[in-house]
Image (cartoon, rainbow, N blue to C red):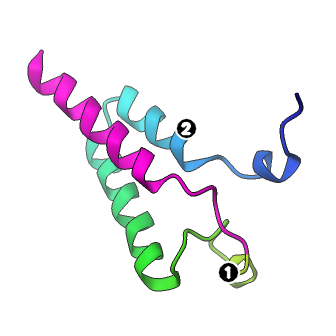
Amino acid sequence: MYADPALLAFPLPHSTLQGLLVSGMHVSALNMMRNLLHDISLFGFVPNGGRIYYLDRSQVRSMCLHICVFFIYAHVLLVQ
């Protein structure tokens, strides 16, 4: 199976979020999720980039997954 080249053009937010959490940058991970939620409230989706011509292309719909990963990771940290 081959990966879609369009998905490889930009880092996926999910892998970025996991990297921030594993690196101990919890505040940055939370701020990243806040920024994505702001984009959703503003545009109705997460644009594929920060420029105006990306407003007709959306990222993979995974905000619920981001929130779950963040809270699972936070729970694991609190239990330890």
Question: In the picture, residue 71 is in which quadrant?
Answer: top left
Structural distance between the alpha carbons of marks 1 and 2: 22 Å
The mark total stands at 2
Circles 1 and 2: CB atoms closer than 8 Å: no
Residue drawn 45% across the image and 34% down it: 18
Secondary structure character of the magenta stretch overall: helix
On screen, 62 above or below 18? Answer: below
Q: Position of residue 50 (x, y in %)?
A: 62, 72
Q: Is residue 72 magenta?
A: yes
| Highlighted magenta segment, given as a residue range | 57-80
Front-most of residues 62 and 5: 62
Using the image, tell me which numbered label, if any, was put on residue 15: 2
* Disc 1 secondary structure class: loop
Residue drawn 62% across the image and 71% down it: 47
Question: In the picture, residue 20 is in which quadrant?
Answer: top left
Residue of label 1: 55
Q: Position of residue 2 (x, y in %)?
A: 89, 32
Q: Looking at the image, is mark 1 or mark 2 earlier in the sequence?
A: 2
> Which quadrant: the N terminus?
top right
Q: Label 1 amino acid?
A: Leu
Left or right of residue 50: residue 27:
left
> Which quadrant: the C terminus?
top left
